Image: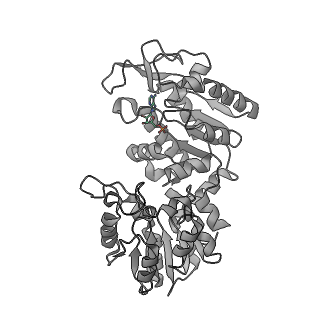
Amino acid sequence: MKSIKDVNFKGKKVLVRVDFNVPLDERKNITDDTRMRESMPTINKLLNDGAAVIIMAHFGRPKKGGFEAEYSLNPIAKHLSEMLNKKVMFTQEVLVDKVAGLSSFLEDGDVMLLENIRFYPEETKGDVAFAEKLAKLGDAYVNDAFGAAHREHASTATIARFFPNDKYFGFLMENEVRNLQKLMNNPSKPFTAIVGGSKVSSKIDILKNLAPIVDNIIIGGGMTYTFLKAMGINIGTSICEEDKLDIAKDLIEEMKRLNTKLILPIDHIIADKFDNEANKSNTEGQSIPDGFMGMDIGGKSIELFKNIILESKTILWNGPMGVFEMPSFAKGTFAVAEYIAKATKKGAFSAVGGGDSVAAINQSGFAKDVSYISTGGGAMLEYLEGKTLPGIKAILD
Ligand code: AMP
C-alpha cells in the first residue's frame, strides 16, 4: 500500500477528498468535529511538506443541483481555518471551470476548500468528464474519506483514474483499510463476531458473509427475537420481523452446516413497556411471557458471552445488545464493551464499527481499550458484507 508517509509533496497541488460531514445545530455550530480532527494528520502532513492543499468534501444530501444555503460548507470552512490556524480559501463556487481559475493562483502552503461537492449533480453520478475537470485542479490525489468509501462518486472514486501514479490513501483511510484487511484476511482464531441492533434485515448480508469466516456469532439486541421466534420460542411483545423468520431459519441451518457456533441470549431483561421507567425483570430462560418485551440480555447471557469473548483472539462488534439509550437496559451492551476491552488487554485484536456500537463503546468508557474503532458507519458495514468499496478499489487498482 503506497502511503503518503513515504512521499514528499513539496511544490505539488494535492487534491484531498475528506469526510467533513459533521453534525451542525440549528445555529450552524459544529456539535462534534471528530471527523474533521481525524483528517488533520493528513492535511498537516501535506502542508508541512510544502504542498498546496485543495480539499473536496460533501455535506448532507443536497437534491436540487446547485447551491443550497442549508448545505453550504461555510461553517466548516470557518472551523477548518481555526483548526489549521491559517486562512482557508473557500471557493463558494459551484462551477468547476471557475474553480480551476482560482486554483491556479495557489501557492505552497495554501489551503483551498471547495464548496459542497454534492452541489454538482455530476458528483453522485460518478461522472467521468466532471472527475477529469476536478483532476485538473491538482497534481496528486489523496482519499481520506473512509465515511464515503462505499460511494462510487466522482470525487471519491472516478477521479483516481486520472492519477495512475499519484493516488494515495490519507492516514485515516490507510488505517481503516489496514485494520479491515487484518480483520477479514487471515484473522487469529477463535474469531468471534458480536452482532446486535434492532433488525435482522439490516444485518443479513453481514451474517451471511461472516458465517464462513468466524468461529462464533453472538447475537444480541432486537434481532434476537426474530431468531428465537424462528426456533419456536415465545417472545411476548418483543420486536420481531415476521417476514424474516424464514431467513433466520436459513441462517441457523447455514451456520450449522458451516460449523459456526451461533450463540443467542439464554435469558433476557424484559419490560412491560418500551420505557426506561417500565417494570422490568430478568427471565429464567429464553422464553418471554406474553405482555412483556425483551429489552436487554440477561445476567446468564452476559456470563455466557463473557466467556466466549475472553477466549477469542479476534473480535468484531457491531450493534448494541439492548436498548442501551435507556439506562435501565444498557447493562448488557456495556458489559460486552468491558469484556471486549479485557480480551484486547489479553492480546486479542478487536474492531468496533457501525453507528450505534461506536456510540455505545464511547459511552461505556472503554473506547480507548479496543484495537480499532471504524470511523465509517455505512462503509464499514458494506465492507463486512463482503462488498468491494469503490473508494478503496480506486486507489488500489
Ligand atoms: P441498528 O441501527 O440496527 O444497529 O440498531 C440499533 C438500535 O437497536 C438501537 O437504537 C437500540 O435501541 C435498538 N435495540 C437494541 N435492542 C433492542 C430491543 N431489544 N428492542 C428494541 N430495540 C432494540
Q: Residue furthest left?
A: 27
Image quarter where the N terminus lies is bottom right
- Horizontal relation, residue 312 to residue 283: left or right: right
Numbered marks: total: 0
- Horizontal relation, residue 341 to residue 276: left or right: right
Residue 76's quadrant in the figure?
bottom left
Residue 59, horizontal then vertical, whole percent: 40, 59
Along the line of sight, which residue is nearer the eye, 67 or 134?
67
- Tell me if residue 348 can be seen: no
Q: Residue furthest top?
A: 290
Along the line of sight, which residue is nearer the eye, 298 or 195?
195
Image quarter where the C terminus lies is bottom right
Along the line of sight, which residue is nearer the eye, 260 or 160?
160
> Which residue does the image show at 27% across and 58% down from the upper left?
29
Residue 249, horizontal then vertical, whole percent: 66, 25
Q: Is residue 266 above or below residue 124?
A: above
> Which residue does the image show at 53% across and 79% down from the upper left?
136
Residue 368, horizontal then vertical, whole percent: 44, 53
Along the line of sight, which residue is nearer the eye, 150 or 126?
126
Q: Residue furthest right?
A: 257
The quadrant of the rendered image in which ligand 1 is seen is top left
> Which residue does the image show at 61% across and 56% down from the upper left?
389
Q: Is residue 317 above or below residue 284?
A: below
Residue 71, horizontal then vertical, whole percent: 35, 59
- Tell me if residue 112 can be seen: yes
- Horizontal relation, residue 133 to residue 110: left or right: right
Colour convention? one colour
- Horizontal relation, residue 310 to residue 45: left or right: right
